[in-house]
Image: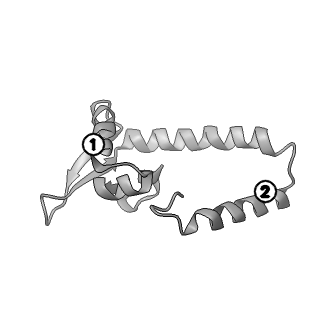
Amino acid sequence: MHLGQAPLHRLSRVELAKRMHVSASTVTRMAAPLEKIGVVARQTDERDARLAFVVLTESGLEKVHEARVTFTKQAGYIFRDRWTEEDLEQLSGLLHRLIADAPGNLT
């Protein structure tokens, strides 16, 4: 989800680790199997080959889209029959305020 929201759908391993609250080596271990199945790819910076990015592939973007659709449906089943639109807007605003200044921006 972090990669889906990032510019060019890519983040450095260090930045992705910060956002996920894990170490960069954990990101490397997590990305390896995703690279094998074609969901993410490794990309080096054009100006500095030492800097590596994790980038979503077309397949990865499709998977993120599918996950969002599924999540939206599930959230609808859980909340729509119990909460009004006003309640949901208020909850959304409060959650955004909660995470706005969190390290790594959890959104």
Of badges 1 and 2, the one in the foreground is 1
Q: Residue at x 52, y 44 (%)?
A: 65
User: Which residue in the protein does label 1 denote?
Assistant: 28
* Visual colour scheme: one colour
Dot 1 or dot 2, earlier in sequence: 1
Q: Where, by quadrant of the figure, is residue 101 drawn? A: bottom right
Instruction: Please indicate whether residue 48 sits to the left or right of residue 96 in the image.
Output: left
> Dot 1, how many residues are within 10 Å of its Cα: few (below 14), some (14-19), or many (20+)?
some
Q: Is residue 9 visible?
A: no
On the image, numbered disc 2 is attached to which residue? Answer: 88
Residue at 78%, 56% in the rendered image: 88
Q: Which mark is residue 58?
A: none
Under tag 2, what secondary structure?
helix
User: What element does badge 1 sit on?
Assistant: helix
Asked whether residue 85 is in view, the answer is: yes
Give yes or no for contact between labels 1 and 2 (Cβ–Cβ under 8 Å): no
- In the displayed structure image, the side of residue 50 where residue 62 appears, left or right: right
Say which amino acid is labelled 1. Thr
Q: Total number of numbered labels? A: 2
Give how far across and how far down residue 23 sits, in percent.
Answer: 33, 49
- Depth check: give the residue in front, 3 or 66: 3
